[in-house]
Amino acid sequence: MRLIFLGAPGAGKGTQGELAEERLHIVHLASGDLLRQAARGADAVGRKITGIMEEGSLVPDELVTHLMLQHVEAQGAQGSFILDGFPRTVEQARALDSGLGKNGSSPIDLVVDFEVSADLVLSRLSGRRVCAQCGANYHLQRLRPRQEGQCDRCSGPLSVRRDDEPEVIRRRLRVYEEQTKPLLDFYRADGKLRALSGEGQVEEQYEQLIKLLRTEHMVAS
Ligand code: AMP
């Protein structure tokens, strides 16, 4: 099973990707998390990536594509995965297709678009907390940790992402509209696009996702 999760920031891609990884044992490859990890080195490239991410712009296509294809290849030619946050431009989608084609690797089976309104995104992202150690996502209302301020998985401290400030969220939404939304037509033309509401509660959203995967014969009924 090879899936792409599309949708605006805050649509629930990351949370649903983490749940699917935990419950269906599919590798969840989140480009934002992998970029944050890659940028941790204090070298000039790391600082440049961090700067771009903190202002809410997109990291250059070649850089993110190279990083993601490495992780995709590590899953083997048939391995299952969910790509969350990648591709984010039509250029990246083309590079992904050709990367998979080159290695005789299975193609993407399905692209799930999580649909949400801009108002909901703003309120959701302002309540988001992430683990500084392992990157797990929480939310002050939707997905509370068992112990306040502490990650359930690794006990790391929870904090607010720098790019979840309201000004930066607005920019990320603009970037999504201008650069990522054209991908919907790209995958619609391929017949791979399916839409899900991103507006429900976490477990409702997961139910909808599983229902979709059953309909598509990707998980057992
Ligand atoms: P995310 O965690 O998916 O919200 O991503 C956080 C930030 O990482 C984005 O605002 C971008 O700066 C960068 N980023 C993540 N994925 C991509 C991508 N596919 N292309 C370019 N930049 C990306």
Image (tube, rainbow, N blue to C red):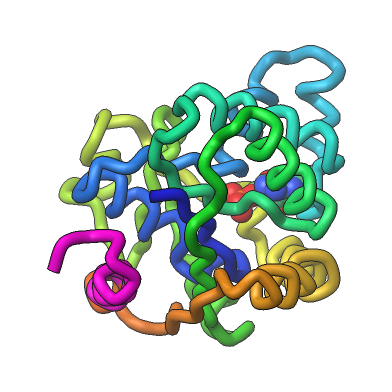
Query: Does the magenta segment cover residue 213?
Result: yes
Q: Nearer the viewer, residue 72 or 11?
A: 72
- Determine whether, in the image, residue 221 is placed left or right of residue 31: left
**Can you tell which quarter of the image residue 197 is in?**
bottom left
Q: Is residue 92 visible?
A: yes
Query: In the rendered image of this protein, does residue 54 appear above or below residue 127?
Result: above
Residue at (66, 60) in percent of width and height: 165
**Can you tell which quarter of the image residue 73 is in?**
top right
Q: Quadrant of the C terminus?
A: bottom left
Q: What x and y, as percent, mark residue 68? A: 64, 34
Query: In the rendered image of this protein, does residue 150 appear above or below residue 124?
Result: above
- Determine whether, in the image, residue 150 is placed left or right of residue 23: right
Residue at (76, 22) in percent of width and height: 46
Magenta span: 206-221
Residue placed furthest toward the left:
221
All told, the count of numbered labels is 0
Q: Nearer the viewer, residue 218 or 176?
A: 218
**Can you tell which quarter of the image residue 89 is in?**
bottom right
Q: What x and y, as percent, mark residue 66? A: 74, 29
Residue placed furthest toward the front:
104
Query: Does the magenta segment cover residue 164?
Result: no
Most common SS among magenta residues: helix
Q: What x and y, as percent, mark residue 167? A: 75, 66
Query: In the rendered image of this protein, does residue 142 appear above or below residue 21?
Result: below
Residue at (78, 51) in percent of width and height: 94
Q: Nearer the viewer, residue 184 or 79?
A: 79
Query: In the rendered image of this protein, does residue 203 appear above or below residue 35?
Result: below
Q: What x and y, as percent, mark residue 11? A: 51, 71
Q: Is residue 53 visible?
A: no
